[in-house]
Image: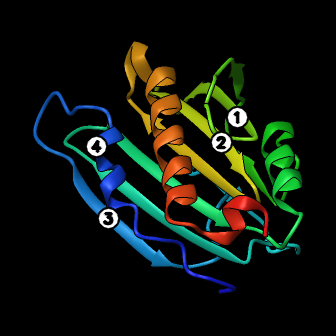
C-alpha cells in the first residue's frame, strides 16, 4: 500500500434507503488489489493500483451497494478511469454495460452504465475520477432510481476524498 484510504463510513448517509430491514456494513480495510468498480473481474497484469479499500452494504434479498476507492501512481488516475469507460483495463465487467449520462460535480470525469445479472436483477455501475483516485460504485436491485443513487454516492465519496485531504485526490 502506497497510502491509506480514509474511512468513509460517514458516506453511508448517501446509501439508498432500504425498503425492508436495514443495511449491514462490511469494510474490507486497506487492500490495494481492489477492482476499480465493484462487480469487475481483474487479471494479475500490471500496472495495478497502489492503494484501495472497499465498503459494502447489504440488506435482505438481492439488494446491495458496494463502493471501491482505488489509488493510482501519480498521473495514472485518468488512464485508470478511461480503462473503466472502455472496459479495456486489467479489471473488466462480466456483463454488457449500457452507458447512461451522469453528472457528478467536483470530479474530473464520471461514468455510469446499467446491466443485469443472469437472474435478471438490475445493476447500475458508476465511476468517478478525482486526481489519481477512482471511486467505483455498484448498486444491485436499485430499481428506477439506480442511476440517480449512483450519482449521489459517487459525489459523496469523491467529496470525502477531497475533504479528507488525500493527496492523490488532488493528483499529487
Q: Which residue carries the number 2 mark?
A: 127
Q: Image point 53% across, 40% down: which residue?
A: 154
Residue closer to the observer: 12 or 140: 12
Label 1 near label 3: C-beta < 8 Å?
A: no
Question: Circle 3 sits in a helix, a strand or a loop, which is it?
Answer: strand
Q: Which residue carries the number 1 mark?
A: 110
Question: Circle 1 sits in a helix, a strand or a loop, which is it?
Answer: strand
Label 4 near label 2: C-beta < 8 Å?
A: no
Q: CA distance from mark 4 to mark 3?
A: 15 Å
Q: CA distance from mark 2 to mark 1?
A: 6 Å
Judged by depth in the image, the label closer to the viewer, 3 or 1, is 1
Location of the C terminus (image quadrant): bottom right
Q: CA distance from mark 3 to mark 2?
A: 20 Å
The first of marks 3 and 1 along the sequence is 3
The first of marks 3 and 2 along the sequence is 3
Residue 13: which disc? 4
Amino acid at each position: 500500500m502506497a497510502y491509506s484510504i480514509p474511512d468513509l463510513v460517514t458516506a453511508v448517509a448517501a446509501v439508498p434507503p432500504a425498503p425492508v430491514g436495514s443495511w449491514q456494513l462490511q469494510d474490507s480495510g486497506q487492500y490495494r488489489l481492489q477492482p476499480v468498480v465493484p462487480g469487475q473481474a481483474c487479471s494479475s497484469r500490471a500496472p495495478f493500483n497502489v492503494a484501495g479499500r472497499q465498503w459494502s452494504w447489504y440488506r435482505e434479498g438481492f439488494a446491495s451497494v458496494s463502493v471501491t476507492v482505488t489509488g493510482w501512481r501519480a498521473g495514472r488516475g485518468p488512464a485508470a478511469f478511461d480503462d473503466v469507460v472502455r472496459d479495456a483495463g486489467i479489471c473488466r465487467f462480466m456483463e454488457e454495460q449500457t452507458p447512461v449520462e451522469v453528472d457528478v460535480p467536483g470530479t474530473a470525469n464520471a461514468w455510469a452504465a446499467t446491466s443485469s445479472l443472469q437472474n435478471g436483477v438490475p445493476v447500475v455501475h458508476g465511476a468517478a475520477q478525482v486526481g489519481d483516485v477512482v471511486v467505483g460504485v455498484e448498486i444491485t436491485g436499485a430499481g428506477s432510481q439506480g442511476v440517480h443513487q449512483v450519482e449521489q454516492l459517487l459525489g459523496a465519496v469523491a467529496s470525502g476524498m477531497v475533504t479528507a485531504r488525500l493527496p492523490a485526490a488532488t493528483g499529487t
